[in-house]
Image (cartoon, rainbow, N blue to C red):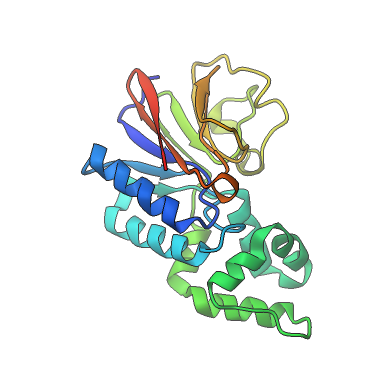
């Protein structure tokens, strides 16, 4: 591993605000001016997505380019819902969107009204947060270490990866090793324990199920893990 600078990569938060706060405190103990990358799926499933987004949005404003949040497939589902609530409502709400709505104080009325529900969520989020979410990148790289939410096609250079693959996954990612020396830090696929092997650094320890949120501390020559 040869990143140009050390950084911390935080796995899928999924609305788990307290573990996130504890993890950020642990990171601060190690480095008072850290570089932090959140690997996406900040929302849904857990009960505090609004609080998670508000915290991470505030940190991105305060820390500038020292703090990066990637777009995960759950952010993608929410953004698609905001653009087309009639067609996308059932998909997003069925994969954790109901918990996100509730965290913003938005509830469904007795009558189905996807556009009205969308408008109430937009009002609760505010324009600045929406603009931030729409601008989230799909990957960030330093040296020979790249960070993505879900996966990368092992047959293609990183500059030729599709946003779909980076955000949603690729069937060969976990079974075919890259041959270009690039290490890929990712979340999306739950693993019991964070690990670094065969050019992949996996950090999604299923916080919304296990209560364990993990960050990888990647530095020139190695990686170790922090878990709360």
Instruction: Give x and y (percent) for residue 148.
Output: 53, 38
- Against 107, residue 52 (above or below) is above
Decide which of 125, 128 is in the foreground and name it.
125
Decide which of 155, 220 is in the foreground and name it.
220
Decide which of 11, 122 is in the foreground and name it.
11
- Against 96, residue 219 (above or below) is above
Q: Residue lying furthest left in this view?
A: 32
Instruction: Give x and y (percent) for residue 12.
Output: 53, 46
Tell me the residue at 57%/51% (across/down).
208
Q: Dividing the image into 4 quarters, which one contains the N terminus?
A: top left
Tell me the residue at 60%/48% (across/down).
209
Tell me the residue at 56%/44% (across/down).
210
Number of numbered labels in the structure image: 0
Q: Quadrant of residue 191?
A: top right
Name the side, left or right, on which 175 lies relative to 34.
Answer: right
Instruction: Give x and y (percent) for residue 80.
Output: 67, 62
Name the side, left or right, on which 61 lies relative to 162.
Answer: left
Q: Dividing the image into 4 quarters, which one contains the C terminus?
A: top left
Q: Quadrant of residue 132?
A: bottom left
Tell me the residue at 30%/53% (across/down).
64
Instruction: Give x and y (percent) for residue 195.
Output: 51, 25
Q: Residue lying furthest front in this view?
A: 210
Q: Residue lying furthest top in this view?
A: 179
- Against 61, residue 6 (above or below) is above
């Amino acid at each position: 591993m040869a990143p140009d600078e050390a950084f911390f990569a935080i796995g899928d938060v999924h609305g788990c605000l307290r573990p996130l706060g504890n993890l950020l405190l642990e990171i601060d103990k190690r480095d008072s001016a850290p570089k932090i990358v959140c690997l996406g799926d900040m929302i849904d499933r857990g009960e505090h997505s609004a609080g998670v987004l508000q915290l991470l949005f505030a940190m991105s404003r305060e820390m500038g380019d020292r703090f990066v949040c990637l777009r995960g497939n759950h952010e993608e589902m929410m953004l698609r819902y905001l653009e087309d609530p009639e067609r996308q409502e059932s998909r997003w709400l069925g994969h954790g969107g109901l918990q996100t709505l509730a965290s913003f104080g938005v509830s469904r009325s007795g009558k189905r009204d996807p556009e009205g529900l969308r408008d109430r969520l937009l009002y609760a989020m505010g324009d600045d947060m929406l603009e931030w979410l729409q601008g989230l990148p799909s990957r960030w790289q330093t040296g020979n270490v790249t960070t993505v939410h879900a996966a990368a096609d092992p047959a293609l250079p990183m500059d030729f990866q599709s946003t779909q693959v980076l955000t949603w996954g690729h069937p060969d990612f976990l079974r075919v090793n890259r041959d270009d020396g690039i290490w890929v830090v990712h979340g999306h696929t739950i693993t019991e324990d964070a690990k670094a092997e065969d050019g992949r650094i996996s950090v999604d320890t299923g916080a919304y199920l296990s209560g364990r949120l993990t960050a990888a501390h990647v530095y020139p020559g190695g990686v170790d893990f922090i878990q709360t």
